[in-house]
Amino acid sequence: MIQKMNRFSRRALLGASAATLAMPGLVRAQAQPVKIGVVAVATGPQATLGNHLRDGFLLGLRHLNGQLGGRPAEAVLIDDELRPDVAVTKVRAAIERDRCDMIVGVVFSNILAAVIRPVTESGTFLISTNAGPSPIAGRGCSPFFFATSYVNDQNHAVMGQAAQDAGHRRVMLLTPNYQAGRDAMAGFKSRFRGEVVDEIYTPLTQLDFSAELARIAAARPDAIFTFMPGGLGVNLVRQYRQAGLANIPFLSAFTVDEASLPAQGEAALGFQTGTTWTPTLPVEENARFVRDFEAAYNYVPASYAAHAYDTAKLVDSAIRRVGGNMADKAGLRAGLRAADFRSVRGAFAFGANHFPVQDFWLAQVGRRADGRFQTEHVRKVLERAVDPFAAECRMPAG
Amino acid sequence: MTAQLLLVQLLNGVQLGILLFLIAAGLTLVFGVMDFINLAHGVQYMLGAYLAAWFAAATGSFWWALILALPAALLIGLVLEFLVFRHLYDRDHLQQVLATFGVILVLNQGVKLVFGAAPLQVPIPDLLSGGIRIMDGLLYPIYRLGIIGGGLAVAAALWFMVERTRLGMLVRAGATHAPMVAALGVDIRRLFMFVFGFGAMLAGFAGILAAPILSVEPGMGDNLLILAFVVIVIGGIGSVRGAFLAALLVGTVETLGRSAVPDLLRLFLSASEARQVGAALASMLIYIAMAAILAFRPAGLFPVRSASAST
């Protein structure tokens, strides 16, 4: 008899204390801030792109008065150091130790490829504001993954279309010899129907293009198309101008943008690029974004910043839909899919594979009245473009 | 490839070779005289470029930047020598590699902290701006001719100093057998400091020259450092003459390889295969050349250390 009572009392005591301990937790949950992990490279020469991304997102938070969906929000900044192993470790820590509710960001595709499974398999949403590798748009599509930027190939295909429309018959291609470079050339050729005179692949470490420029001058194509990211693009643009080749139209993607224009300066004037966004797009939100960005950070934003800004607004709209309940994954997914926010690009919608269906522009480098350089939209090349990999996506239920 | 294009590519190769020589000369002297592997030579090149960018932004003139950045690069080299390298002369090569690698990491991050991660721009001086038409539709920037001229002048000055002056004699003696030179009463520490500082200044000078045509960013010296090591191994460690010839060789092989190999392969393979294989083969070409040369001359083209010299 006495033993039974002891067992009963012990169980009751344990149950009561457990309930007491849990209650303050339940009360605290709604007042705790929403934590968003922002993955952006902050080390090395590519840190400029990470800075654009981070500052764009933080400006979005500021415009939302530090709240997402009505709840106070906190951005947890994660430097991936452009190393996949470091990125995975830090992102895991952000989810497990810091209890981040969502992960946004990622400039580079190799980092995204490394972190997507740890994040999505933990039931956390991952929203890419820049990297858009084609496998994730196609067969690898995930109910926990969204991209607010593009599929990487699209910007190259846009220039292929633009070259086709402009009547260029003979084009030379120039890119570094790695997977992204080869994908870029394939993307360009997917829409360009003229003759590819030559494809030049340079070592990733090569900074001096004099030999390649001599080949271009000898071949005299109608135009060149290049994908030369980062410091490579800075060198190529300046050397291209110095070699007197600027009369051959310079078509590009990810080579002349506001991240590299401060270094390229006048040499890049008139060079063309394909993009989803320019600071000059006549959208009301865009004007406010560019103005406040420059006031806060004192440099001209690039598309990395614009997409990150849009992502903050997107996340806000989704959290608002579920009333701040981050545990409602299905509701959050529906909220993200609805994309009920005003983008700096104008109309914004997601396709079935969680990548945007959007307009693409041909843009040209110009100089502003205050002497700074920016990309300026020239004409729309693709309207409401669906990426070519969307059909391969069989989206599993969340 | 037409004869005209070939000549143009040769010119490009010579220009790359001259730049490599300026970096390799200091490296080979330091390695030869002091038996000190200085991986941080690449960041000294980078520091020269950053100093040039800083002074150019401050004074608005390339020439003032050159005049001010050279002694500044020398000073930083001497500071590094005093703080770090001096303690490593008697250590074995692995410890030297580790320490100088650490210096690379620290300075790369330091430069990013001070100047930011974005690439900097240095304007080409007006005197050397513009280009000359060497081929239909191609301008060769006069500034690059200036680099070739400046590099040849430095090579000539180095030759004179090493071959014709007393100091150069001490340097050559030190490269052959340093303990003997010390035993003869020469202050070997002062000689080392001079050689190191001079080497740092040469690397900085190369950085200043390269800054207007290549983007100034953290880590810009790391890839050229690898090429510089290939140059000094081919040329013979400790030999400036060897470094000069090897640098020209490496520069022309690298440039001609990039331009000619894909075209050559098109004789055997399909166009897209030729491009892929050609690109990969072209980047391997100088290492294949190095292996071939070392197979016949294991100590390089102009070996300095006699076989009996053991430390």
Image (spheres, rainbow, N blue to C red):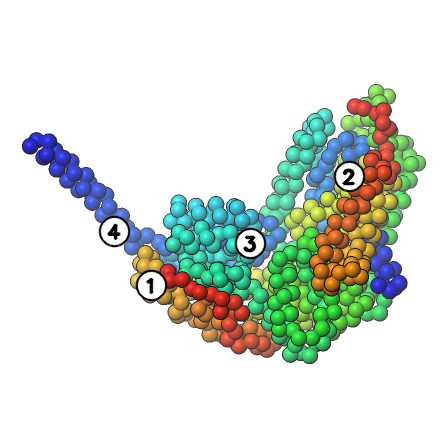
Q: Residues within 10 Å of mark 2 (few under 14, many from 20)?
A: many
Which numbered disc flags the more N-terminal residue, 4 or 1? 4
- Assign the N terminus of chain A to one quadrant of the image: top left
Residue beneath disc 1: A331
Disc 2 sits on a residue from what chain? B
Q: Residue at x 61, y 62 (%)?
A: A183
- Where residue A334 appears, x then y in whole percent? 36, 66
Which secondary structure, mark 3? helix
Q: Chain of mark 3?
A: A
Query: How far is disc 4 from disc 3 in space, using C-alphas?
Result: 40 Å
State which mark lies toward you, 3 or 2. 3
**Amino acid type for the residue under numbered disc 4:** Val
- Residue to which mark 2 is pinned: B27
Query: Dot 1: few (<14), some (14–19), or many (≥20) neighbours within 10 Å?
Result: some
**Residue located beneath label 4 in the image:** A27
Label 3 neighbourhood size at 10 Å, few (<14), some (14-19), many (20+)? some
Instruction: Tell me the amino acid under the disc marked 2.
Output: Leu
A44 versus A201 height, above or below = above
Tag 1: residue type? Gly
